[in-house]
Amino acid sequence: MTPLQKAANLTVVVLPFGGFLASVVLLWGNFITWRDVTILVVGYLLTCLGISVGFHRLFTHRAFETSRPLRYGLAALGSMAVEGSVITWVADHRKHHNFADREGDPHSPHVGRGDGVREALAGLFHAHVGWLWGDQAHADERRYAKDLLADRGLVWVTRLFFPLVGLSLLLPFAAGWALGGTLGAGLQALFWGGLIRIFLLHHVTWSVNSVCHFVGRRRFQVRDESRNVWWLALLSLGEAWHHNHHAFPSSAFHGLKRWEIDVSGLLIALLARLGLVWKVVRIAPELQARRELGARPSAELADAPAGS
């Protein structure tokens, strides 16, 4: 990783965190309105769906297909989450699946760690945010995202990453100014709908990397330490049914039981009904049963790659 990339990652981590610390003081003084909360929630939902439905399920795992306008729209929304460009994000995540919790995984909390509380905390920190400055932080895009590099539209969205980041800050400012009628209302909306939104979404996403490989429930035969964490699944719109996802990486639905709420999966199902997405990958109950812990190991599991 170049010094410029390390500096950029540091800025992306520290600046929203500074905003979060300021928000504690501002909330104490009631420096927030329902207008700010609405802008924050709408921005969070849209950019989170850009990551979960777009970057993750569509581009990384090809869990469904869709039209070019929706494809590039999801890529733009995911970019506005400020977690890196679509091609970089996909390459890093595919590498994670190829080496899940083994040497080469960019953000495993287990690799190279011993036993004990200090080692566990160090592993969690690395998986959560420390990996952004590690030797394995970025994957070779030509190896892990060759298909996306061949898509000229996605290459353009990648080149527009920084303008899209600027737009993700401009839009809440404009909404606050338009609804509040003053420059101060715009700046206040920028704070909540910009910095605080980015902070919250970053740490929810990073918690899937850290928490969901450390604590939670497991029910499938997998070769890594992935876990399902129900409360984080609510905040991540279904991404924290992470053990399910590692068992069936190409599934469009991470919540595999009726009570496993997966907002991103519900959106994909709705888009499929409307004819806006197709070739949606669904995992048959029979295959799920064969993969469950305690079931006789199947040939599919024995021959399956670590991830895709």
Image (cartoon, rainbow, N blue to C red):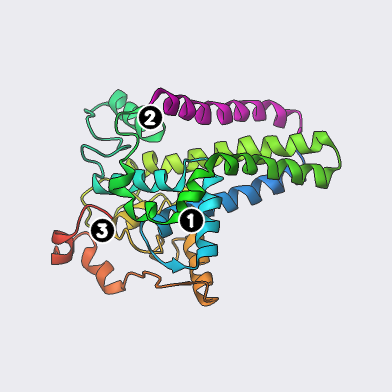
Residue 155 vs residue 42, the one in the foreground = 155
Horizontal side, residue 295 vs residue 168: left or right: left
> Which amino acid does the dot numbered 3 rest on?
Phe
For marks 3 and 1, give the one nearer the viewer.
Answer: 1
Q: Where is residue 41 drawn, in percent x and y? A: 64, 48
Horizontal side, residue 261 vs residue 210: left or right: right
> Which amino acid does the dot numbered 1 rest on?
Gly
Residue, far right = 181
- Residue 220's disc is 3
Residue 152 vs residue 13, the one in the foreground = 152
Question: At 53% across and 54% down in the image, what residue appears?
Answer: 49
> Which amino acid does the dot numbered 2 rest on?
Phe
Residue 115 vs residue 254, the one in the foreground = 254
Question: At 55% across and 63% down in the image, what residue appears?
Answer: 69
Residue 252 covered by magenta stretch = no
SS assignment at label 2? helix
- Residue 153's disc is 1
